[in-house]
Image (cartoon, rainbow, N blue to C red):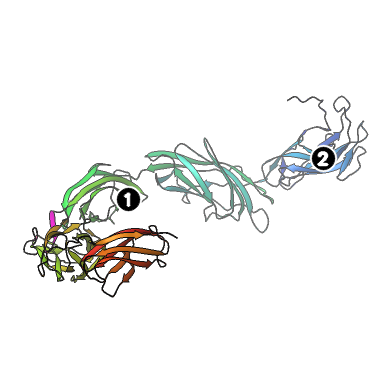
Amino acid sequence: MFLIGRRALTFRPQPTQFTFPVTLVDVDAAVNPSSPPVARLTIPSLALNPFQDTVRIDSIAFLPDEQVFRYTLTNERNQLVTLPVTLLPNGQSALNIRFDFRPRAPRTYRARVAIYYSKPCVDVDTTILLVGVGAAGFPYAMYMQFDSAAVAVDTFRVVSCDTLRVPVYPSRAFPKTSPQRSIVDLTCRFAYDTTKLHLERVTSAYGSVVSVMEDALGATVQLANLLNVDSLGQLMVAHFTVRRQQSDTATIELRDFDFNTTEILRYDLSTTRGDRAIVFIETAAIALVAPPSQGVLSFDSVRVLDCEQRQITIRNTGDVPVLIDSILRLPPTVRAIAFVPDRTVPRMPGEETTVTLEYCPRDFSPMDTLAIVASTVPCWRDDSIRIVGRGYAPPFPLRITTDAANPTTPQARGGTLGDTVSIPLLLDRDVAATYRGRTYWLEDFSFGFRVRWNHTMLKFLGITPRIVNGVVRDSFDFPNQLRVSIEHATAMRADTFALLHFRITVPDTAADVLVIEPTGPVQTDSLLFLDVQLLGSTTPIVTSGKCGTTIARSSGSGLQSIEPNPADDVLRIRFALSQEASPELRVYSTRGDCLLTRAIPQLLAPGTHTIELPLERLPAGVYRLVLRAGILHDEGTFVRVR
């Protein structure tokens, strides 16, 4: 991109810099009548301003405006004028700006004259520079000190993790700036090694902190509106932090004072002197020495019901006393049982604290954790250690059986057709362990198992709980499985905890078995001090004949058809009977729930029969149909559609 055009000087102020002589505070600066401080503004000739536009000056200000400079405006005929003023080209008009200086404090003042104009464009001109020096006829000796005792060399000590607070005291009260009060602005500098220290902030009870600007060699601090400062209090407090966490020394020097006020300061404070201090940086540190830092503390294998103890040693490796009082992130099975010396006793540099840790496992799971050893005074310091261990218990086989005398090979159970039999469920031993002469009972534990049998031989009637401290829950899976769970049991003995009730039916075999199988491990929220290994058992079931009948076998009897299949509203079941009987139809869901029953009260003669079964109450799905008629037992499946 290219910009093509001609530069033009809109207007020219002459001269562009004025320096006033040294002037007493609250007195107008002396002016040489032959060369008064007057700037003349005109529109230049065609050579410098080819456009010759009219200039409209709207306002004039001083940057910064410290209320020590002022101006008076006259035109080309030395007549007083007020803003806004219009300058005409071709030398037709001019604006004379006369400047005056009246200092408020003994210091150097600098300001730019800002001339704001709106024609031929909106802009500001800051070409003119004003410089003036204020002087005071009354010297005022004062010191800024780091302590109220005014010692020759101040020393501070700070822990590398702490904050150093450096107070500043004036040796005398600040001078009055009016008959009623003293209000002063102060700029000063802290010189220090910024690679070692950092000036975090400055606070003052007498006024506001305008800024804290740190550079490579220190920091400059500006305080404003310090009201009635006296020598009894702290003028300000500098807060330093340490950049590197190591032992070191540094120096802090307070210097370069500059005083100002919005009122009148008639005293010369230019001789104010600062102070110098030496800072000793000390470290706070701890370290594990046995086992070493970031080492491993092993408890090996510990039996549940037992506890093992190990010791760790922590040393103060820093320069200041510390309080070794915390061990964090310990698992619930590990605790600190002793601090030697007590955790409330500070440890001097080089001294050690011994901590005894005790591991009491509650189960057989391994432990592997990273623990933190910490000191909280004078600040947080820590080290870490890995703690490992494992709980164990001897194997504890526990069998669920039906025979206390022969738990491994239970005695056969059974009966004749139509008999009701009760089969006990029991444990073959007490759920307890004796350790070091004391018997411990397993508390609040749970386990589950299932029982399976030949459903043509046994018809399940129910279960009766016999447990005292616990709950027995069961779920029957038609036709030949029962799920049992023992929950929240305590102190279970080798005794019957439930009874299974069956009715002997016509079997398809004279001998079969009842099988008990565990479905999961023992669970507990209490102390698991036994490695329980659940075992099942197999009980023989034997039936004997009645009226010379041992096994019923049907010849040509049973379900012949289920129509229609799938069915909509009515199902027709065709079956054959080989003897007189009263049929009963039952419909089961896939979950084993009986949803529909149809019984024929009268006896039907041998032969083929058809029964209609309404299906309005059944939702769409797959169902199992069971037909029973005397010794006949048959089943089939059908699908209900809508």
Q: Which residues are magenta?
A: 394-410
Residue 405 magenta = yes
Going by the numbered disc 2, the residue's amino acid type is: Tyr
In the image shown, does 491 or 597 lie closer to the viewer?
597
Q: Position of residue 530 (x, y in %)?
A: 16, 57
Residue 483's disc is none
Residue ID at (63%, 50%) = 184
x%, y% of residue 597? 32, 69
| Residue toward you, 580 or 250 | 580
Q: Earlier in the sequence, mark 1 or mark 2?
A: 2
x and y percent of residue 28 in the render? 77, 45
Q: Could you classify mark 1 by the number of other residues whose Cα lies within 10 Å: few (under 14), some (14-19), or many (20 or more)?
A: many
The image quadrant of residue 452 is bottom left
Q: Quadrant of residue 110?
A: top right
Mark 2: few/some/many CA within 10 Å (<14, 14-19, 20+): many
In the rendered structure, the answer to whether residue 230 lies left or right of residue 58 reads: left
Which x, y percent locates residue 387? 24, 47
Element marked by disc 1: strand
Residue nearest the viewer, comparing 167 with 481: 481
Tell me the amino acid under the disc marked 1. Ser
Magenta stretch encompasses residue 569 = no
- According to the picture, the residue beneath numbered tag 2 turns out to be 117
The answer to whether residue 216 of the structure is visible from this angle is yes
Q: Is residue 196 above or below residue 409?
A: above
Question: In the rendered image of this protein, does residue 475 appear above or below residue 320?
Answer: below
Label ID, residue 375: 1
Q: Nearer the viewer, residue 363 or 471?
A: 471
Q: How far apart in space, not on screen, are marks 1 and 2 (Cα)?
A: 68 Å
